[in-house]
Amino acid sequence: MPADSKTKTTILKLRRHKRTKEKTCMVTAYDYPQALIADKAGVDVVLVGDSCGMTTHGYKTTIPVTMDEMVNHCEAVSRGAKDAFLVGDMPYMSYQPSDQIAVENAGRFIKAGMDCAKVEGAMIDRVKAICESGIMVMSHLGLTPHTRAKLGGYRVQGKTAKSAEIVLDQALRLQDAGCSFLLLEAMPTEPAGMIAEKLSIPVYGIGAGDRVDGQLVIFHDLVGLFWEFKSKFVKRYCEAGQLIQSSLEEYRQEVKDGVFPAPENFYEIKEEELEKLLGDSSWKYETDRVENLAKPKHSVTPITTKRD
Ligand code: KIV
């Protein structure tokens, strides 16, 4: 594995962001070109999220996503993003069954080039086990899609004082268990900000207001490549889907009209070769080849289907 680039974002830089109040910018990516683009744009953290289930595989939820699929995405992203800090998202049932399974699967993310593994929920024992194995963990609280049925659906969390206190308590226990980062999903601004203030580790948000230490947006939401639904917290910065579609429509039309390919897209043959080709029978070379093939150079034992 190549050594990290000199400009690679590390945990030290991310902690410094928190100290100096510089906001950390995070985006998801699932493949090589997305990772290259995110890296070139100077995004600090790339999350290979199991949201790939919906954005890339067309599943209705993240639940069907497997470890093998995630590892595949992580490997592609790690080849593209040289500078961003990389987080691999542990999919459903890759960490719940036991500490050992959690550690083994977190290890697969590190082998796939990730810097850190993200674990949903207040999984204190699992987080402790992974951290003790030397792997950094980003915990994920608030709206946790793996337990959406238990939460009564995709609902904003921490809207009452009591539920916000529960999230704060879970966050503190996860920090004590050794997790290095916390991500809050779909929470009101004030409780999320209070949690970011109370914790010494960086606390990021996706739909958790502007008082946290950094922001995450899903790549496909940001560039207009996901159409199933649009959460309130999403800001679309462009409509890449529309741009790609109109380019494909133009391409299709040009093929139908014979406009594409044009001479600048053609390969050339030298004039003298073209003259030879046009002057001779177009079958000459083919005939020679077939004749040569028909004459075996060595004596050949014929294949027989007869048995002794
Ligand atoms: O999978 C993902 O991208 C995530 C974010 C929605 C937090 O977990």
Image (spheres, rainbow, N blue to C red):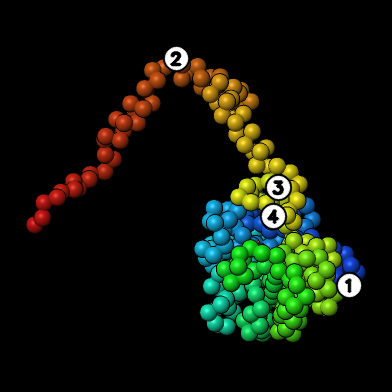
Q: Quadrant of residue 262?
A: top right
**CA distance for labels 3 and 4:** 14 Å
Image side of residue 214 versus residue 139, left or right: right
- The answer to which of marks 3 and 1 sits earlier in the sequence is 1
Q: Amino acid at mark 1?
A: Arg
Q: Nearer the viewer, residue 36 or 238?
A: 238
Q: Disc 3 vs disc 4: which is toward the camera?
A: 4
Residue 19 image label:
1
**CA distance for labels 4 and 2:** 67 Å
**CA distance for labels 3 and 2:** 55 Å
Q: Amino acid at mark 2?
A: Gly
- The answer to which of marks 4 and 2 sits earlier in the sequence is 4
- The answer to which of marks 2 and 1 sits earlier in the sequence is 1
Secondary element under disc 1, as helix, strand or loop, is helix
- The answer to which of marks 4 and 1 sits earlier in the sequence is 1
Q: Disc 3 vs disc 2: which is toward the camera?
A: 3
Q: Which residue is mark 2?
A: 279
Q: Quadrant of residue 83?
A: bottom right
Q: Amino acid at mark 3?
A: Val
- The answer to which of marks 3 and 2 sits earlier in the sequence is 3
Image side of residue 248 versus residue 238, left or right: left
Residue 231 image label:
4
Residue 223 image label:
3
**CA distance for labels 3 and 1:** 31 Å
Residue at 66% over, 64% down: 155
Secondary element under disc 4, as helix, strand or loop, is loop
Q: Amino acid at mark 4?
A: Ser
Q: Disc 2 vs disc 1: which is toward the camera?
A: 1
Q: Is residue 62 above or below residue 16?
A: above
Where is residue 170 drawn, in percent x and y?
A: 71, 80
Image side of residue 112 versus residue 160, left or right: left
Secondary element under disc 2, as helix, strand or loop, is helix
